[in-house]
């Protein structure tokens, strides 16, 4: 009888242990019970599982992270906890996001809270992220807006290739781009963006791979199979519980890899 090698099983066990330890470490650093966090934030924590999401992204102490189109800063606050005093978090909005999130951001940063988080406003054509500046960039339920157009609401078309190239250029070698977004029906590309604020995850993958990033895994924690992906994300029947994909992309560790 042929004996099966124990090595694959051992490697799988080690991977599971490493993943669990990473999640535990980030969970400890990203505390839902941190002082002065709002009840609304804690309610969102239960739906969005941010500690597990950031563990999946590999966010760690000392990292430099950009929260792009981060709105009022829900994730920025958690990221600051994760990276600690030795790290740095940039909350970057464009004019449209800043206007939408103005009140929420004022409340979150009131009385000097989160003074370590840098806040900037820049338009999509020139985000000002620089080159090889960040260990990670996160876009949470915001990437689809790169493909959204509403001139009347002050949201002109964005040059998406240029935008995605800026994200890739801003990452350090080996850096990670985390995308969390509302899933559209398979094969719809960007067709559902304007109508439903959803985007096809296979389309997202193609777009970011064209920008030079490599797909590095997905997390199913935020999937909701009961959502048939036909409703607007703000529909009361599914708001907060849409089917969402979580993708991790990575920049090559060295040029040419």
Image: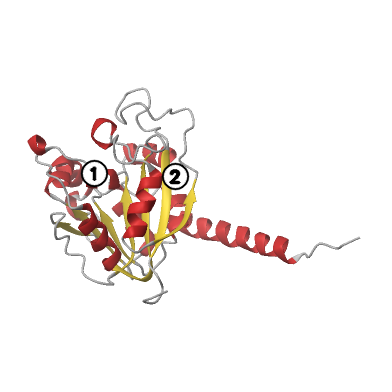
Q: What residue is drawn where x is 27% and y is 67%?
A: 169
- Identify the residue position indicated by label 1 in the image: 145
Q: What residue is drawn where x is 40% and y is 46%?
A: 202
**Eyeballing the image, is 94 above or below 240?**
below
Percent across and percent down for residue 120 are 16, 58
Percent across and percent down for residue 35 are 34, 49
Return the residue nearer the eye: 229 or 50.
229
Dot 2: within a 10 Å radius of its alpha carbon, few (fewer than 14), some, or many (20 or more) residues?
A: some
- Mark whose residue sits in front, 2 or 1: 1
Q: Which mark is residue 49?
A: 2
**Eyeballing the image, is 146 above or below 3?**
above
Return the residue nearer the eye: 187 or 43.
187
Q: What residue is drawn where x is 14% and y is 37%?
A: 150
Q: Report, in whole angstroms, how far the alpha carbon at label 2 lies from the one at label 1.
A: 22 Å
Most distant residue in the right direction: 1
Asked if residue 159 lies left or right of residue 202, the reply is left
Q: Secondary structure at mark 1?
A: helix
**Eyeballing the image, is 48 above or below 171?**
above
The colour scheme used to paint the residues is: secondary structure
Task: State the image quarter where residue 15 is shown.
Answer: bottom right
């Amino acid at each position: 009888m042929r004996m099966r090698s124990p090595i694959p099983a051992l490697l799988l066990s080690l991977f599971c242990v490493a993943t669990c330890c990473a999640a535990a470490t980030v969970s400890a650093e990203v505390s839902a019970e941190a002082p002065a966090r709002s009840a609304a934030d804690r309610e969102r924590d239960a739906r969005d599982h941010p500690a597990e999401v950031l563990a999946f992204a590999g966010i760690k102490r000392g990292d430099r992270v950009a929260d792009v189109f981060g709105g009022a800063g829900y994730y920025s606050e958690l990221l600051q906890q994760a990276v600690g005093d030795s790290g740095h978090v940039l909350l970057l909005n464009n004019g449209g996001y800043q206007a939408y999130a103005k009140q929420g951001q004022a409340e979150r940063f009131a009385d000097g809270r989160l003074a370590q988080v840098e806040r900037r406003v820049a338009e999509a054509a020139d985000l000002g992220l620089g080159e090889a500046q960040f260990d990670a960039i996160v876009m949470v339920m915001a990437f689809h807006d790169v493909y959204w157009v509403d001139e009347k609401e002050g949201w002109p078309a964005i040059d998406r290739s240029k935008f995605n190239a800026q994200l890739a250029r801003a990452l350090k070698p080996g850096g990670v781009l985390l995308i969390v977004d509302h899933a559209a029906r398979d094969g719809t590309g960007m067709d559902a963006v304007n109508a439903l604020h959803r985007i096809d995850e296979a389309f997202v993958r193609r777009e970011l791979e064209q920008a030079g990033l490599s797909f590095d895994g997905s997390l199913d924690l935020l999937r909701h199979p009961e959502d048939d992906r036909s409703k607007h994300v703000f529909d009361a029947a599914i708001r907060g519980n849409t089917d969402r994909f979580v993708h991790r992309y990575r920049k090559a560790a060295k040029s040419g890899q």
